[in-house]
């Protein structure tokens, strides 16, 4: 988790504004869709750069953005001149712990998320067949549900397609915490700017 949420939000705000200014100075006469794209790109890069590449999702955001050659200047300005997603400053040291405790996933957390739906499906199967489902039928239902939810998470978390299940849960928990900070920053910025301001 974040040590000081208000300082983290200030850093995200500072980086995001830097990205918006950088984009607005280099692009003129933008369409509405292009403005939305710039706002999202700079917000995501701000979030990833403040997270300092210490998580896979933050490195995946930077790597994805860097695939477009037009973004390289923005990435360099937001991350610093000597740093990109491949450099040591964005790759965590082996065994480093950020002390957030987000990686601890208990068996009860797994069970609680899907047990209700499994029970409902088993009851439906029992009613339709007039018999209780066999153990392997319940297990296959559980496996399908877990696989479906895992795929949803892999689509949601940047870089999730390349993660194993345990890493995916850790990264998802961390990503959600930081997304919440990003949303708080966006709300604060939206409330502080006049309605006529544009990038």
Image (cartoon, rainbow, N blue to C red):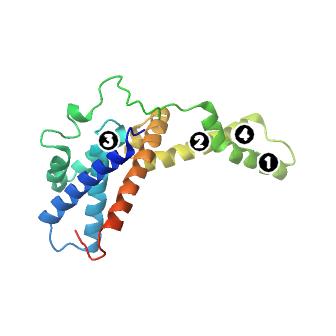
Q: Quadrant of residue 24?
A: bottom left
Q: Which mark is residue 146?
A: 2
Q: For the residues labelled 2 and 4, say whether their Cβ atoms are less than 8 Å apart.
A: no
- Is residue 108 toward the left or the right of residue 55 in the image? right
Element carrying mark 2:
helix
Element carrying mark 3:
loop
Locate residue 156, reporting x and y percent.
44, 50
Q: Nearer the viewer, mark 3 or mark 1?
A: 3
- Structural distance between the alpha carbons of marks 2 and 3: 29 Å
Q: Which mark is residue 123?
A: 1
Residue named by callout 4: 138
Residue named by callout 3: 51
- Structural distance between the alpha carbons of marks 2 and 4: 12 Å
Q: For the residues labelled 3 and 1, say whether their Cβ atoms are less than 8 Å apart.
A: no
Locate residue 154, reporting x and y percent.
45, 45
- Structural distance between the alpha carbons of marks 3 and 1: 45 Å
| Residue depicted at x 23% and y 40% | 85
Upstream in the sequence, badge 2 or badge 4?
4
Q: For the residues labelled 3 and 4, say whether their Cβ atoms are less than 8 Å apart.
A: no
Upstream in the sequence, badge 3 or badge 4?
3
Q: Residues within 10 Å of mark 3 (few under 14, many from 20)?
A: many
- Structural distance between the alpha carbons of marks 2 and 1: 18 Å
């Amino acid at each position: 988790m974040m040590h000081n949420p208000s300082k983290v939000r200030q850093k995200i705000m500072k980086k995001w504004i830097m990205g918006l200014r950088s984009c607005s100075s280099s692009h003129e006469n933008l369409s509405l869709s292009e403005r939305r794209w710039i706002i999202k790109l700079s917000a995501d890069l701000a979030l990833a750069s403040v997270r300092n590449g210490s998580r896979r999702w933050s490195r995946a955001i930077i790597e994805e953005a860097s695939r477009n050659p037009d973004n390289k200047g923005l990435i360099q300005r937001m991350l610093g001149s000597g740093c990109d997603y491949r450099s040591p400053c964005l790759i965590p040291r082996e065994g480093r712990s950020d002390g957030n405790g987000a990686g601890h996933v208990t068996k009860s957390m797994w069970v609680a998320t899907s047990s209700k739906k499994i029970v409902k499906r088993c009851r439906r199967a029992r009613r339709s067949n007039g018999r209780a489902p066999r153990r392997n039928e319940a297990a296959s239902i559980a496996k399908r549900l877990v696989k479906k939810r895992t795929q949803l998470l892999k689509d949601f978390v940047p870089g999730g397609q390349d993660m194993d299940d345990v890493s995916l849960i850790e990264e998802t928990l961390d990503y959600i915490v930081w997304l919440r900070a990003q949303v708080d920053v966006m709300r604060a910025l939206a409330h502080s700017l006049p309605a006529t301001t544009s990038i």
